[in-house]
Image (spheres, grey):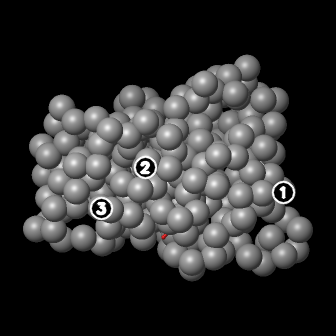
């Protein structure tokens, strides 16, 4: 039985002063039936590690370097994240793939670097609207996933995968539960071809998840929770989504 997982992606939002109120609101919403993670910008990680110490809401980051250490100005290594108590890191978010030209290989190397430090990578895959309309969804997510499965080999069972249709991120357009389930079933089938643990891997859906659509998405057989952007910035909305996984 897979535990549900809900991950908030704060992106480049929030202020240092406002974070305490958001965390307080989230903690007040407990108990949650599944696992809950907040992925914050790097400079906030120290404060948040202190606020979440001993709590059952985990801390995550939004990216890490593919390198272990060295002359890579501006990058943050997975070991640095681990030192700040991060248990998860998002890699390959479509905004990073687009803004920073991250290739499938770089994303896979970042996932590998995270795992080496005991940080669970949440690897994002997803098709653009043009790719979906051209009937390429299956090919695109299969290509993105296979680079990761190839790079991580038997360690693939230790990651989380987030399917985020690019056309649904921050647009208010959500994939229907049936559309999302179809892609998740495909991803699980591809995983089953390379690991005996495919049925244990958690596959998240991301893309305009809100309190009012979370339950119908999370009740699909291969959707194990969500990666939540905009709606993770409001405590009551995020708490309702976390509870939708029950
Ligand atoms: C995201 O940033 O990963 C995301 C899914 O954003 P939103 O929920 O705002 O669509």
Point out the tag, 1 or 3, that comes first from the N-terminus. Answer: 1
Q: CA distance from mark 2 to mark 1?
A: 31 Å
Upstream in sequence: badge 2 or badge 1: 1
* Quadrant position of the N terminus in the picture: top right
Residue 69 image offset from top left, x and y in percent: 32, 42
Which is closer to the viewer, label 2 or label 1?
2
Q: Looking at the picture, tell me which residue is in the foreground, 245 or 105.
A: 245
Q: Position of residue 197 (x, y in %)?
A: 68, 22
- Circle nearer the N terminus (3, 2): 3
Give the farthest residue toward the right.
Answer: 135
Q: Residue at x 82, y 29 (%)?
A: 193
> Badge 1, how many Cα within 10 Å: few under 14, some, many 20+?
few
What crowding class fits label 3: few (fewer than 14 Cα within 10 Å), some (14-19), or many (20 or more)? some
Q: CA distance from mark 1 to mark 3?
A: 37 Å
The residue under label 2 is 242
Expressed as whole percent of the image width and height from the top left, the position of residue 187 reads: 75, 44
- As rendered, which of 162 and 194 lies closer to the eye? 162
Is residue 144 something that shows in the picture?
yes
The answer to whether the residue bearing label 3 lies less than 8 angstroms from the nearest atom of ligand 1 is no
| Element under disc 3 | helix
Q: Which residue is mark 1?
A: 139
- Foreground disc of the pair 1, 3: 3
For label 3, the residue is 235
């Amino acid at each position: 039985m897979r535990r549900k997982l809900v991950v908030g992606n704060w992106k480049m939002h929030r202020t240092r002063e406002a974070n305490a109120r958001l965390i307080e609101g989230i903690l007040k919403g407990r108990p949650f039936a599944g696992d809950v993670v907040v992925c914050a910008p790097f400079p906030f990680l120290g404060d948040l590690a202190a606020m979440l110490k001993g709590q059952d809401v985990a801390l995550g980051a939004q990216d890490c370097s593919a390198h272990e250490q060295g002359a890579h100005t501006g990058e943050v290594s997975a070991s640095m994240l681990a030192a700040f108590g991060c248990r998860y890191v998002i890699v390959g978010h479509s905004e990073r793939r687009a803004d920073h030209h991250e290739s499938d290989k770089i994303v896979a190397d970042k996932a590998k670097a995270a795992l080496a430090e005991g940080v669970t990578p949440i690897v994002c895959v997803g098709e653009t609207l043009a790719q979906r309309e051209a009937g390429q969804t299956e090919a695109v997510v299969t290509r993105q996933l296979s680079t990761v499965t190839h790079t991580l080999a038997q360690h693939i069972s230790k990651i989380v995968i987030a399917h985020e249709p690019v056309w649904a991120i921050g647009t208010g357009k959500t994939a229907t539960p049936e559309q999302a389930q179809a892609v998740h079933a495909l991803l699980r089938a591809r995983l089953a071809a390379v690991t005996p643990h495919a049925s244990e891997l958690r596959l998240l859906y991301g893309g305009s998840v809100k309190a009012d659509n979370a339950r119908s998405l999370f009740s699909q057989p291969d959707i194990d929770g969500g990666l939540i952007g905009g709606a993770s910035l409001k405590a009551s909305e995020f708490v309702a989504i976390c509870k939708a996984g029950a």
